[in-house]
Image (cartoon, helix red, strand yellow):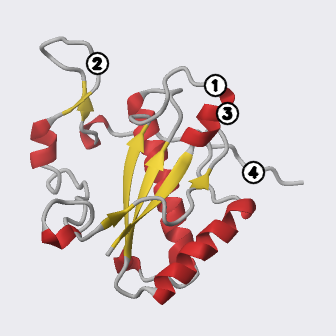
Amino acid sequence: MTMAACTRPQQPDPSMTAVATRPTGGASLDWISPEDVRRASELGLMTRNGGFGGDGEAAGERIEGLLPSVFFDFDQYFVRSQDRPALQEAVDFLRRNPAARVLLEGHTDWRGTTEYNMGLGDRRARSVRDYLIQVGVSEDRLETVSFGDLKATAGGTDEQMAFDRRVDLVVFR
């Protein structure tokens, strides 16, 4: 009988994060370092496509709520089988609207650190992105962003927390 070895998750390299302790104090212990944002490519971080969600004509019209959100179990980021019909609706919409693009916004509930939740929101958005690519959506029509717990209801009920664990599909035309 063979046994698979259990491996522990690797600790993130602290130099690869833009979240740090604010040196001047303040109410929040987490903040985005402007210096790390300026050095994003040097640090190996990817920047978002300016045509998604930016200001100006390049962004296009932002349409929220047109496509259904995809929901996740606690601390999970895989697409559940019950959410595949919602994603098929997105695929069908994109086939009918070849100029449309979709921004996948990853969210988490309020539990956990800001840094962990930003990563989990990103993994959720990328999981939906990967699924859509596997079923034939062109990669250049999709973009991801993580809001982590920034839009979650702090101290929410179980029902509210279940609603906060999602990826919103925002259409841009």
Q: Is residue 136 above or below residue 111?
A: below
Mark 1 residue element: loop
The image quarter in which residue 140 lies: bottom left
- In this rendered view, identify the residue nearer to me: 141 or 116: 141
**Which badge, 2 or 4, is on the more N-terminal residue?**
4
**Which badge, 1 or 4, is on the more N-terminal residue?**
4
Mark 2 residue element: loop
- The disc labelled 2 sits on which kind of residue? Leu
Q: CA distance from mark 2 to mark 3?
A: 28 Å
Look at mark 4 in the image and give the residue it sits on: 4
The image quarter in which residue 114 lies: top left
Contact check, label 1 and label 3, Cβ < 8 Å: yes
Look at mark 3 in the image and give the residue it sits on: 159
- The disc labelled 1 sits on which kind of residue? Thr
The spot of residue 147 in percent (x, y) is: 38, 43
The spot of residue 155 in percent (x, y) is: 54, 20
**Which badge, 3 or 4, is on the more N-terminal residue?**
4
- The disc labelled 3 sits on which kind of residue? Glu
